Amino acid sequence: MNLKRFILQVTFFLAALAASLTLAGPARAQTVSARFAGKFNLTSPVHWGKATLPPGTYSIRIDSTTSPIMATIRNDRSTFMIRVMSLASSDDHSGSNALRLKVRNGSLVVQSLALADLDTVLIYDPSPAQEKVEEAHTDSTVHVLVARK
């Protein structure tokens, strides 16, 4: 009697496990289309949050525009990846996608990311309103090329 009950329980468990694995497979196969995807090129090191991006080509992807807005940045060889969260955002109708940089203590720092496709600016460093900004001796804007489908 106990052996039959044990076999029935094991059979039920294995059937439930097989059903859950079968249903979980298609759920993972779905891909989320990005709200924004683009590329940019850096010619010198840039600080973004606590990370330092070395010179190179990068891709940027934003999956959702609900707060907090997270962006994933990868280098072109997929050997370097960071996720950054914007501190704030504001409306922007400038018509360009650009990474806006400033010089702080002799280093380039990401101040904001203007996304014309989303009519918004993501702010990563709000300090310019609170401190004196040094004059940038390099281009303070990096254009972001949008990846279109």
Image (spheres, grey):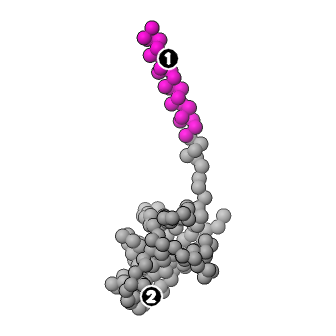
Judged from the image, the secondary structure of the residue bearing numbered disc 1 is helix
The residue to which callout 2 is attached is: 138
Magenta stretch prevailing secondary structure: helix
Nearer the observer: mark 2 or 1; the answer is: 1
Nearest the viewer among 21 and 2 is 2
Q: Between marks 2 and 1, how big is the CA–CA gap?
A: 73 Å
Q: Quadrant of the N terminus?
A: top left
Q: Height in image: 140 above or below 13?
A: below
Which of disc 1 and disc 2 is earlier in sequence?
Answer: 1
* Residue furthest out toward the top: 1
- State the extent of the magenta-drawn residues as a range: 1-24
Residue 89 image point, x, y percent = 51, 73
- Disc number placed over residue 8 in the picture, else none: 1
Residue 80 image point, x, y percent = 42, 64
Q: Quadrant of the C terminus?
A: bottom right
Q: Height in image: 132 above or below 63?
A: below
Residue 10 visible, this orientation = yes
Q: Height in image: 35 above or below 124?
A: above
Nearest the viewer among 95 and 42 is 95
